[in-house]
């Protein structure tokens, strides 16, 4: 390994980003990066002209953890020397540098970053046409799958007829889909993305119920029902919540039917607990807001 590092150490800033990121995922990056520091411990300015290497260093530095000084310094060094390049319109690197400084790969949406990288890669003279073609084909296939998932979700949302049943609710189903898409975009996670989006969309609607629609008395009744996870004949509840809660139970039943086939029914208890905790927090926030609003009205009246 040390012989390999001797080789990498001489060429590290010209290595491709994958190699450098792999080094930063291990303890060996400190050894390799140390070769680019002077006797005072600062990064050598001689490497500042290697734009591709600086980009690799910049992206890799985002894999740092707390108190990892060498990567903290690497990030500052790379950014300092990359920022002037964004002002050079005649530089072939300007567009890529601007994009990386605004959206580092580790903080970006994987499928979006893949699409951006392909547009950059195909402009390189040394690009491999077969790999590029394979990448585009894979991107198109995954994109079609995501579009199919969105079709399922939008149909589900439209069938709920929220403009009539929940007219106060925000239409956020597409936005909610982006959350699981960013977390797990692999094709084999399609069922998980659909389920998480449905739950997220309903939780978003619950937030609207507590923030802008329900009265305090209604919200307290809703909380009791949520904690029991069932509606009894004795419960006096608004019709909009009955509809929302039935929809939530239907989604949970759908999820349970799926996970039970895999022997993972136990996870449903944790999901229920998470939704209940969110609901309790919504009630607490609404109670505080109600008190503040009441005090504000009194102060104006007096």
Image (spheres, helix red, strand yellow):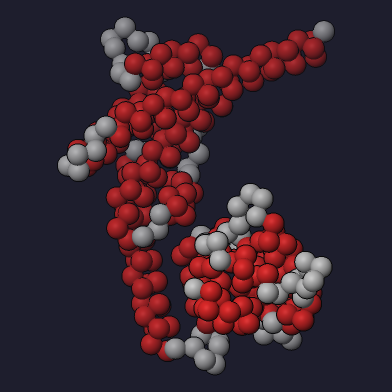
Going by the picture, which residue comes out furthest to the front? Answer: 2
Left or right: 298 with respect to 100? right
Left or right: 232 with respect to 109? left
Against 17, residue 269 (above or below) is: above
Against 244, residue 109 (above or below) is: below
From the viewer's side, name the closer residue of 183 and 253.
183
Residue under the point 39% across and 31% down: 165
Total marks shown come to 0
The x, y position of residue 282, in whole percent, is 53, 24
Against 234, residue 229 (above or below) is: below
Residue under the point 38% across and 87% down: 130
- Where, quadrant-wise, is the C terminus in this rendering? top right
Asked if residue 145 can be seen in this view, the reply is: yes
The x, y position of residue 293, in whole percent, is 69, 17
Residue under the point 53% across and 20% down: 283
Going by the picture, which residue comes out furthest to the bottom? Answer: 125
The x, y position of residue 57, in whole percent, is 64, 70
The x, y position of residue 263, in whole percent, is 19, 39
Against 283, residue 244 (above or below) is: below
Asked if residue 81 can be seen in this view, the reply is: no
Residue under the point 30% across and 32% down: 268
From the viewer's side, name the closer residue of 259 and 199.
259
């Amino acid at each position: 390994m040390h012989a390999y590092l001797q080789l990498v150490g001489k060429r590290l800033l010209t290595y491709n980003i994958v190699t450098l990121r792999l080094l930063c995922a291990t303890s060996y990056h400190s050894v390799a990066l140390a070769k680019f520091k002077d006797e005072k411990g600062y990064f050598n300015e001689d490497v500042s002209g290697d734009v591709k290497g600086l980009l690799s260093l910049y992206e890799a530095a985002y894999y740092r953890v707390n108190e990892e000084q060498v990567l903290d310094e690497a990030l500052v060094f790379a950014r300092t020397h990359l920022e002037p390049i964004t002002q050079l319109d005649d530089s072939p690197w300007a567009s890529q540098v601007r994009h990386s400084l605004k959206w580092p790969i580790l903080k970006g949406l994987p499928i979006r970053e893949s699409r951006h990288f392909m547009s950059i890669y195909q402009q390189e003279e040394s690009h491999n046409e077969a790999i590029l073609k394979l990448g585009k084909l894979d991107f198109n296939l995954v994109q079609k799958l995501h579009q199919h998932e969105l079709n399922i979700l939008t149909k589900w949302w439209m069938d709920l007829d929220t403009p009539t049943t929940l007219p106060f609710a925000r239409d956020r189903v597409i936005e909610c889909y982006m959350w699981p898409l960013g977390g797990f975009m692999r094709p084999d996670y399609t069922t998980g993305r659909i389920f998480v989006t449905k739950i997220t969309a309903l939780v978003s609607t619950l937030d609207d119920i507590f923030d802008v629609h329900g009265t305090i008395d209604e919200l307290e009744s809703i909380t009791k029902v949520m904690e029991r996870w069932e509606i009894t004949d004795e419960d006096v509840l608004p019709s909009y919540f009955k509809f929302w809660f039935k929809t939530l139970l239907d989604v949970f039943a759908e999820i349970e039917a799926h996970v039970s086939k895999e022997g993972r029914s136990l996870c449903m208890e944790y999901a229920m607990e998470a939704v209940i905790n969110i609901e309790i927090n919504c009630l607490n926030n609404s109670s505080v807001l109600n008190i503040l609003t009441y005090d504000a009205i009194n102060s104006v009246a007096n």
